[in-house]
Image (spheres, rainbow, N blue to C red):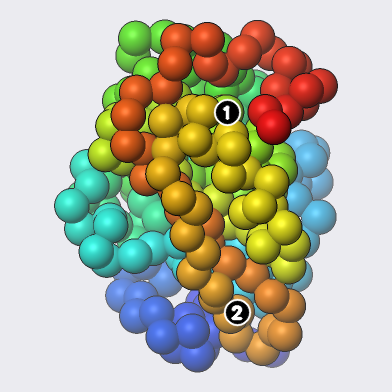
Amino acid sequence: MASFADILEECAAAAGIVLTAEQIAQFARYNEMLVERNAHVNLTALTAPEDVAVKHIIDSLTAYDASLFGAAHTLIDVGTGAGLPGIPLAVYAPHLRVTLMDALQKRVRFLTDVTAAMGLTNTRCIHARAEEAARQKEHRGRYDIAVSRAVARLPVLLEYTMPLVRTGGTVLALKGRAYAEEMAEGERAAAILGGGAIAARPVQLPGRTDVRAILSVRKERPTPKAYPRRPGRAEQKPLP
């Protein structure tokens, strides 16, 4: 049976992603700890080696765009869960200072442990809700990139993430087959929150036929102080 490292290396090559031996070793450690901790903490439903390699790590790395990430210094992963896509991006772009934010303390403990075990020195793990963090001086308007995967529909997600990025920064949302529908849903919210037009970059995972895309919104002006609304309000009544 092929090792996780071999599976990841093969899948990355198929996706056109070049990983160093050190990065593959870091991801192998991530996989080991993810599977081990998932027996006690609900981190993911997908723990088979190929699923972790493709649906977690490679999928996360599809968010990387050299023209955007090369000039960025700070990134926040909102609702990071098991550290996706933030941890793979921190490994792949070590010049970034990556903040992994989640509302569940058990997940944050896993993130703290796994990033330490991987030897990542460019990450920090914080326990917070986006609606609260985005009203704090430490976080509001402080990031070049905000990224999120499998957290909420786009109008809600933009209310969580847009206040966190600086003017000129970018929100990235990793989305599945309904991405075009979500783009249409999110247009008004993007405008209200200070964003420009929503762009889509379709991506293909190796060995998979499902449709996926990276949605991006550039922040063109400050987000009004009224946003984000109090916890739960965005889900109850998304911006039109």
Total marks in image: 2
Q: Position of residue 129 (x, y in %)?
A: 60, 19
Q: Position of residue 34 (x, y in %)?
A: 64, 52
Nearest to the observer: residue 30 or residue 187: 187
Residue 141 at x, y percent in the picture: 33, 23
1 or 2: mark nearer the eye: 1
Task: Specify the quadrant of the image occupied by residue 108.
Answer: top right
Q: Which x, y percent locates residue 67?
A: 24, 64
Of the 4 image quadrants, the one containing the C terminus is top right
| Badge 2: residue crowd in 10 Å (few <14, some 14–19, many ≥20) | some
In front here: 117 or 159?
159
Q: Residue at x 20, y 58 (%)?
A: 70
Hey, which quadrant is residue 156 in on the image? top right
Q: Secondary structure at mark 2?
A: loop
Name the amino acid type tagged 1.
Glu
Q: Please determine whether, in this image, residue 42 is positioned above or below residue 177.
A: above
Q: Is residue 138 left or right of residue 88?
A: left
Look at label 2 and name its amino acid: Leu
Mark sitting earlier along the chain (1/2): 1
Vertical order, 150 against 14 (above or below):
above
Determine crowd level at label 1: few under 14, some 14-19, many 20+ residues with C-alpha closer than 10 A: many
Q: Which mark is residue 159?
A: 1
* Residue ID at (49%, 28%): 193
- The residue that appears at 38% across and 18% down in the rendered structure is 140
Residue on which disc 2 sits: 205
**Residue at point 35%, 76% (across, down):** 19
Distance (Cα) linking label 1 and label 2: 28 Å
Is disc 1 placed on a helix, strand or loop? Answer: helix
- Residue 115 visible somewhere in the drawing: no
Res 73 seen here: yes
